[in-house]
Image: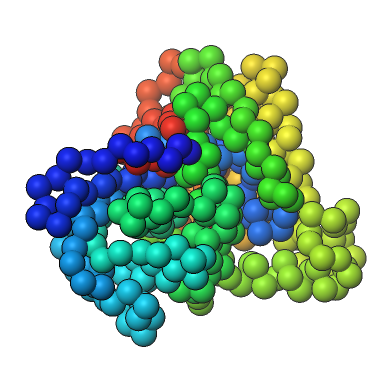
Amino acid sequence: MRHSNTRLEHTSPEGRGVQAFAPGRVNLIGEHTDYNDGLCLPFAVERGVTVTAEPAPGTTIEAHAEDLGERDSFELGAESGAGDGWRLFVRGAAAELRREGIELRACRLTISGDIPRGAGLSSSAALCVALCLALCEIAESRPPKRVPLARLCSRVENDWTGAQTGLLDPLASLCGERGRAVRIDMRGPQLRPVPLDLRGHQLAVLDSGASHDLSADSGYNERREECRAACRALGIESLRDATSGESLPEPLNRRVRHVISENERVDATVAALEQGDLAEVGDLLDASHHSLRDDYEVSVPEVEGAVETCRQAGALGARIMGGGFGGSVLALFPPEAQLPPGAVSVEPGPAARLL
Ligand code: GLA
């Protein structure tokens, strides 16, 4: 990401406005590995969230979620205490930036997006990243670098919305590159771009229609707790260090098996892409899906239906994507295939940026 001085010319009497865009993401493979210090292979997509900030007098931040027709306003320094849904991201982003010592200024925020919410494309990380970039730019402050900024966004989700999500989504939004996925080793984290040469094949997402929920009382947080329990039982810090979970009771043994095998599938996918073996990539997507369905148990009937629809349409592989319990399915189609109705083709796009 580049810190640019480009500003939107704007008519506001208090000065000029700025605009930031952050993309959503697709995770090619490596699911439920990020919070286990593991591997994943996401890419930023073209769609995302745009936040416009205009300077305002006083000490109030006013926010308007255009697509929802909803508003919020709060005093800088008094972010907590109220709000739900998208408001928590605005308040949390402002509070966490201020905690980093960034002096924010009063402004009017307008939020809009072209990414479906709750479809597993990480609209919430896109929202958080775009908010942070816009809030810093309007305050003429340099935003944190991308890894600390991803951690900050993760804290906003964890501490403000109660979803214990990891670094995958904000990092993918901040590190996107046209034509490339990024292999992320969450130990570090270490990032390595991986060219996504699909030789005419298409990746597409199909919304299962079941909106996923990663909030405090969701199955997502339950899986995280199971991973912590498995670590305690194995006497290790993180499941990245696990070599086998077979000694553990049900279902922890299967949770560990998923994490170990999914990490292996990430590197197998990188190798298959390097060799141009798209059939193998398809098989790995299928294997990931089976593991997420049977061992990690994050699928639901609507998702199984969407996977089946993709297979019927000739997909070489299809799998549940993101946190699970709903959301979108990702599928790889051969060049001649016709995408099933509702499927949207996805390609790697650039990272979050000021417009
Ligand atoms: C959600 C979370 C991520 C990651 C995925 C599962 O998208 O936000 O941090 O855990 O689920 O891979």
Residue at left offset 52%, top offset 61% = 152
User: Could you tell me if residue 144 is visible in this image?
Assistant: yes
Residue 166 location, x and y as percent?
Answer: 59, 59
In this rendering, position of residue 203 left or right of residue 244: left
User: Could you tell me if residue 209 is visible in this image?
Assistant: no
Q: In front here: 265 or 154?
A: 154
Quadrant of image for the C terminus: top left
Residue at left offset 21%, top offset 72% = 58
Residue 167 location, x and y as percent?
Answer: 58, 54
In this rendering, position of residue 14 left or right of residue 82: left
Residue 267 location, x and y as percent?
Answer: 73, 35
State how the image is colored: rainbow
Q: In which quarter of the image is residue 238?
A: bottom right
Q: Quadrant of residue 235?
A: bottom right
Residue at left offset 22%, top offset 41% = 8
Q: In the figure, 76 relative to 291: above or below?
A: below
